[in-house]
Amino acid sequence: MRYDVVVVGAGIAGPILARNLAKQGFDVLMIDKKAEIGSPKRCAEGLGIGNFKKYDIPLDKRFINREIYGAAIYSPNGHKLELRYNRVSGVILERKIFDKMLAYYAGKAGAEVMAKTEATGLIRSDGKIKGIKARHEGEPLEIHADIIVAADGVESRVARWAGINSFLPPHELDSAYEYEMILEGFEFDPDMIHLYFGNEVAPRGYVWIFPKDDDRANVGIGINGDNPNTAKYYLEKWLKENNIKGSKILEVNVGGVPVGGFLKELTKENVVVVGDAARQVNPMHGGGMAEAMEAATIASKWISRALEEGDLSLLENYTTEWWANDGERLMKVLEIRKISEKLSDDELDAAVQALSGADAEKLAAGDYRQVFKTLIKHPKILLKPKMLKLLREAL
Ligand SMILES: Cc1cc2nc3c(=O)[nH]c(=O)nc-3n(C[C@H](O)[C@H](O)[C@H](O)COP(=O)(O)OP(=O)(O)OC[C@H]3O[C@@H](n4cnc5c(N)ncnc54)[C@H](O)[C@@H]3O)c2cc1C
């Protein structure tokens, strides 16, 4: 088997990249170890509406569970900050269908797709990487390709095989735990996502409710991966404290979210790393689908140029372009996350109350710096010297 490009992983980054390259006429094979692409999923399924147009994905009702009109943020003392829009701001997906449809779009564009095919190593000869070794339905397989794409998620092995330092210490990982459940006896607005903050609620993270029905939702939590207690412990505690019966659980999701920074080297020789495999995740909220789409878009541009011009050194431009744009922006978000995780509950309360005056659009767009500028002037913050100092550091 020989291809221009072999893509390992058919989550989000893999199919976008495979589709873009296949559209341009390159021979692309995308493999995934899952027997059914998209399933099982590990995701709360929230995605900003702008990403569909930006990455040329149809708004297909088959994978859109419901439209969302904003977010409600709850501070430890229960203060509620509502960021409501009079238009759709995002959607809750059915990711099992979404991932499969993204693979379908890649296939329709001309890429070959093989489910139940696991990459097991790299083929090397004459000191060069020539492709990947895989296992398809238990049978060994050799796939030769000019370029290998590691889109194999947070547990990526392909990047490591290529010699990229992808060691992830537990502190740089958030541990996530989620139920899709019927929320009996708990009122929530199903048109909004709901985020609960507090050091006792979710250390370094938050509890989320991403509605899928009036009474059904993805209810999950992310906490620092080196916490002595588990994410499940904190989620169960929160459910109990809110008198939510945990007796109607439809699905359990457990996963790691890389929130401690991004791979410095996004390529090595002819291997290109995208998405969670490169830790391209927003370190503030842990969402990585939009970041995976952006990385796949930049990477596919430079893979196409490298193949057209027969010059693999052009792949390095992917690292340069990603770091100059998303990388720089997300590093600032990481700095701010590191500051916000030091806040006491009292300070979190003050921040959420003060944010009531901030620009909702800017907050939703992740323009944290602008929001901090608003915060710093708020009387509640002015009275808190530690917080004022932290905010000044962030600006
Ligand atoms: C609990 C939880 C909730 C989340 N909620 C959200 C959310 O609401 N919004 C959001 O934007 N992000 C969310 N995320 C993050 C989001 O799921 C990821 O950032 C996103 O899926 C990254 O896409 P990807 O293509 O890089 O990797 P993935 O989607 O993880 O895809 C990687 C694929 O590679 C395959 N694979 C791995 N190894 C091999 C191998 N050796 N051979 C073949 N195939 C292989 C896997 O089977 C998988 O299909 C959440 C994460 C978790 C854990």
Image: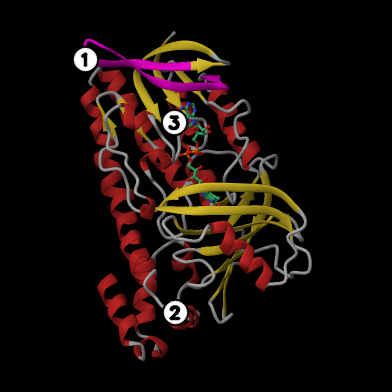
In the rendered structure, which disc, 2 or 1, sits on the residue that comes first in sequence? Answer: 1
State the residue in front, 54 or 261. 261
Residue that carries the numbered disc 2 in the rendered image:
351
Amino acid bearing label 1: Gly
In the rendered structure, which disc, 3 or 2, sits on the residue that comes first in sequence? Answer: 3
Residue name at image x 22 percent, y 20 percent: 311
Look at the image and tell me in which quarter the C terminus lies: bottom left
Distance between the alpha carbons at the discs numbered 3 and 2 = 39 Å
Residue name at image x 54 percent, y 26 percent: 33
| Rendering colour mode | secondary structure
State the residue in front, 343 or 70. 343
**Regarding mark 1 in the picture, which secondary structure is present there?**
loop
Specify whether 353 is left or right of 338: right
Residue 169 placed where, x, y %?
34, 49
Q: Main secondary structure of the magenta part?
A: strand
Residue name at image x 74 percent, y 69 percent: 186
Residue 141 placed where, x, y %?
47, 11
Region rendered in magenta: 112-134
Residue name at image x 54 percent, y 20 percent: 113
**Would you identify the image quadrant in which residue 376 lies?**
bottom left
Amino acid bearing label 2: Ala
Residue that carries the numbered disc 1 in the rendered image:
127
Residue that carries the numbered disc 3 in the rendered image:
17
